[in-house]
Every structure is written in structure tokens, then in C-alpha cells.
């Protein structure tokens, strides 16, 4: 993930030195805590946590589009064959 972080205190560049995958236990959730350190050691040097989470796709993954199409076709076949669904 290419991601620039600024120090919320002094606006200097900050580096992410660690991260915690907060959402890993929850299905379908992408959420991380990014542990950041301000590089302005002389005047600031604070450390802080930035939360990063998935919001939405701009372009869905190709694989999902194909799977979605297959799923639609499968359901339509079931309907036309008079299937009882699940
Ligand atoms: Zn700072």
C-alpha cells in the first residue's frame, strides 16, 4: 500500500513503522492500525496510530466480475430448469 502519512501535530512526514491487522478476525473486513512516527525528531518526534480501512471499489476485481456473471447464469439456468433453488 502506497500511503503517505503526515504528522497530525507538526505536518512533517511520518513513517509507518508497524501495523496491526485489526480486521483479520472479521470476515470481509479490511482494517489496519498503522503505527506511525513523525520524522521531525528535533521539534516533535511523536508517535501515533492511523486507522486505515477499506471503503469501496472504484473498479471491482476482474475475478469478481467473472464470478458474478457465472453466478447470474447459474441462477438463470436453475430458474429455467424449474429448480427448487437451494
Ligand atoms: Zn510531528
Image (cartoon, rainbow, N blue to C red):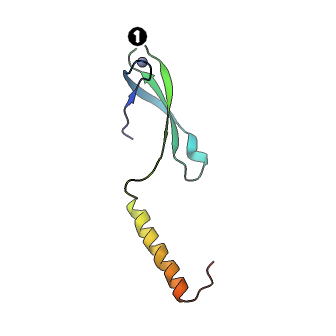
- Which image quadrant for residue 6? top left
To which residue does mark 1 refer? 43
Which residue is at a point 51% across and 28% down the rendered structure image? 49
As drawn, the residue found furthest toward the top would be 42
Which residue is at a point 48% across and 46% down the rendered structure image? 54
Name the side, left or right, on which 83 lies relative to 3: right
Instruction: Residue 30 in the image: state x and y as whole percent.
Output: 51, 46
Q: State yes or no: Cβ of the residue under disc 1 lies below 8 Å from any atom of ligand 1.
A: yes
Instruction: Residue 67 in the image: state x and y as whole percent.
Output: 45, 69
Which residue is at a point 37% across and 32% down the rendered structure image? 4
Name the side, left or right, on which 35 lies relative to 13: right
Instruction: Locate the N terminus and report the quarter of the image it occupies.
Output: top left
Instruction: Residue 33 in the image: state x and y as whole percent.
Output: 52, 35
Q: Is residue 54 above or below residue 78?
A: above
10 Å crowding of disc 1: few (<14), some (14-19), many (20+): few
Instruction: Residue 17 in the image: state x and y as whole percent.
Output: 45, 28
Determine the quadrant in which ligand 1 lies. top left
Amino acid at each position: 500500500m502506497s500511503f503517505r502519512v503526515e504528522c497530525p501535530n507538526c505536518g512533517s512526514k511520518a513513517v509507518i513503522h508497524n501495523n496491526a491487522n485489526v480486521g483479520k478476525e472479521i470476515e470481509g473486513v479490511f482494517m489496519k492500525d498503522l503505527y506511525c512516527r513523525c520524522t521531525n525528531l528535533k521539534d516533535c518526534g511523536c508517535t501515533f496510530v492511523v486507522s486505515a480501512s477499506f471503503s469501496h471499489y472504484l473498479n471491482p476485481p476482474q475475478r469478481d466480475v467473472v464470478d458474478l456473471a457465472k453466478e447470474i447464469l447459474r441462477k438463470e439456468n436453475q430458474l429455467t430448469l424449474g429448480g427448487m433453488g437451494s
